[in-house]
Amino acid sequence: MSQQRRLVLFLSDVEGNLTALRQTLKGVCEGLELPTPEVKWVDARPDALADGGWHVAEIPLVSGKTSGKVSSPEEHLDAMTQALSKDFRDRSMGMYVDREHSYARVCMAAPSRPPKAMEGEYLDVLRQAARWLDVETTTLARLFSGNAARNLLAAAVDFGPDGKPV
């Protein structure tokens, strides 16, 4: 999958209950007066995520601009992540990636704890999200960019954030 914009949800110990996931998202969206988005399990989740107990779901995003009156699901990432954590009584993380603009936002929520969030440059957010999930950055990058993940991360290491050789 080489989509430029993606909204992915990471759920701990859900046992594949897509119906419960849809119900939680429906409740959040109704409260925000949003249309309920589609959601599906990501078929090709990396083994390290599966081994760590993480289930991965994706909310397909509509390409192009939406009308000014209807907000997009990624604008409510924090609310969705917190609701999932509360309803499933376990950790959850949501991540929005816009590869075209090298932007990402991540939110990690756990019951009885304040949520943690970060937004900014794609690689910086990706590294933080990988730490929160306790997986290698390349593992998470592969989920968002396929085989280009290693090359993308290697370029950041070889050339540094300013593009000059290290």
Image (spheres, grey):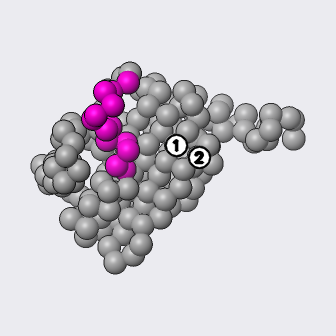
Q: Residue at x 49, y 48 (%)?
A: 105
Q: Residue at x 76, y 41 (%)?
A: 161
Specify whether residue 110 is in view. Answer: yes
Q: Which quadrant would the C terminus be assigned to in this image?
A: top right
Specify whether residue 12 is in view. Answer: no
Helix, strand or loop at label 1? It is strand
Q: Quadrant of residue 113?
A: bottom left
What residue span does the magenta drawing correspond to?
65-77
Specify whether 166 is left or right of 122: right
Q: Residues within 10 Å of mark 1 (few under 14, many from 20)?
A: many
Reply yes or no: does residue 70 show up in magenta.
Answer: yes
State the residue position of label 2.
120
Q: Position of residue 107 (x, y in %)?
A: 44, 56
CA distance for labels 1 and 2:
6 Å
Tell me the kind of residue under disc 1.
Ala
- Prevailing SS of the magenta stretch: loop
Q: Give residue 104's mark.
A: 1
Q: Is residue 121 above or below residue 61?
A: below
Q: Position of residue 122 (x, y in %)?
A: 58, 41
Residue at the extreme top? 64
Residue at the extreme front? 69
Helix, strand or loop at label 2? It is strand
The foreground one among 92 and 103 is 103
Tell me the kind of residue under disc 2.
Gly
Reply yes or no: does residue 92 show up in magenta.
Answer: no
